Image (cartoon, helix red, strand yellow):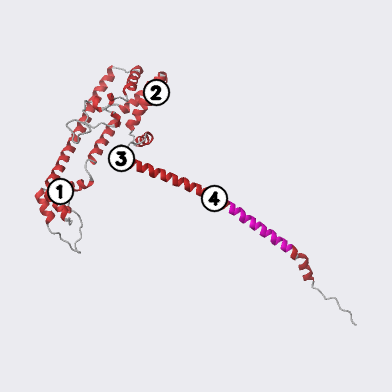
Amino acid sequence: MEELKQPIIPASFNQAKTKGKTMKERSKEHRERKKAYIANLETKIVDLETQIRDLTTENEQIKAQLEKSSSECKTQVVEKKSGVAKSSDTSKNKIEKSFKSSLHEYEDFVYDKLNKKMMENPDEVRYTTLEQAYEHIEDYSDDRFIYIDSQFRNIINNIVGIETKIYQACLKNLKLSEIKRRMKTKKRHSKYFVKKEFRLDQIMFDEEWSKPLMEVMEKYGEELQNFGKTIKSLVKKLVQVRNKLFNTYISMAEIDEKIYDTADYHKQDVKGLFEIYNLIKDTKYMTPHYLWDIPKRPDSELAYKDFELSSSEDDE
């Protein structure tokens, strides 16, 4: 019999066999990759669990803060309704600081910081520093002019509400009988009618007003108009007071120039004023009631008499 010949194996096959990996090797690599993948998942799970715990703790803290804030707000509302609402010293100081004018900042600098330095070691305080600071807090300083003017303007701008300002702007030059007549006049409405510009004495009467409002105007129109006239008179008096005050400052400034020409203040004079201020600053002797002989308005009274002024917390 013919001998069986050995099959001829292509060289490329033998090369592929030597370069390739066995089944055992591939299985081992697969197990290692699977093991690494699982380990990675376990690590991620641990990280996520840690994040969940942290977020849960943070969420609980936020809830506690919200509950605390809500409780404080409710307490403040209740206190306000009962008339005993008082801000904490910290919040009050923050509010006061944020709204302080340059005038009060300079006054604090002089009567607080320089005051303390003067009491501890007068030699550390230069007179030129005091002199420069005093220029801002004198009775007739520019800072005081600006502050007082802004306060007068605030009073005048807020002396009535916006609704009253609207009525005053539109009706102040009209008689009550004319107002009633024109408010009752039938309004002209047309889709072809376009207002190009308004007339102040007409815009109030271009609107359709409700029956209850018409009844109010009919019944109380005179009282409402008198209220507007009274406020107008008071505003003019406020402006007169402001102008008289400023003119007084100007006169005093001229006198003060003559005083400085004949006298020269020293640090010992300032130190003496600081010592007196430290004694009386938190007493009734620095309140407007004592300084200007303004009577206090009794808490039991609703109406004010002549020069009466309500007591503030600082007066206590």
Q: Residue at x 15, y 48 (%)?
A: 171
Which residue corresponds to mark 3? 80
Say whether residue 104 is left or right of residue 179. right
Residue that carries the numbered disc 1 in the rendered image: 171
Judge from the rendering whether residue 46 lies leftward or rightward of residue 200; answer left or right: right
Q: Is residue 95 above or below residue 164?
A: above
Could you tell which of marks 1 and 2 lies nearer the N-terminus? 2
At mark 4, the secondary structure is helix
Residue 255: x %, y % from top left: 24, 22
Q: CA distance from mark 3 to mark 4?
A: 43 Å
Q: Are marks 3 and 4 in contact (CB under 8 Å)?
A: no
Residue type at tag 4: Gln
Three-letter amino acid code of the residue under disc 3: Lys
Does 211 appear above or below 90?
Answer: below
Left or right position of 71 against 197: right
Comparing marks 4 and 2, which lies closer to the viewer?
4
* Distance from the alpha carbon under mark 1 to that under mark 3: 37 Å
Q: CA distance from mark 2 to mark 3?
A: 37 Å
Q: Residue 173 in the image: state x and y as whole percent.
A: 13, 46
Residues at badges 1 and 2 in contact (C-beta under 8 Å)?
no
Q: Quadrant of residue 67?
A: top left
Q: Is residue 45 magenta?
A: yes
Q: CA distance from mark 1 to mark 2?
A: 58 Å
Task: Examine the rendering and report whether any part of residue 108 can be seen.
Answer: yes
**Which residue is tagged 2?**
116
Badge 4 or badge 1: first in the primary sequence = 4
Determine crowd level at label 2: few under 14, some 14-19, many 20+ residues with C-alpha closer than 10 A: some
Gap between marks 4 and 1 measured at Cα: 67 Å
Q: Residue at point 59% right, 52% down?
A: 46
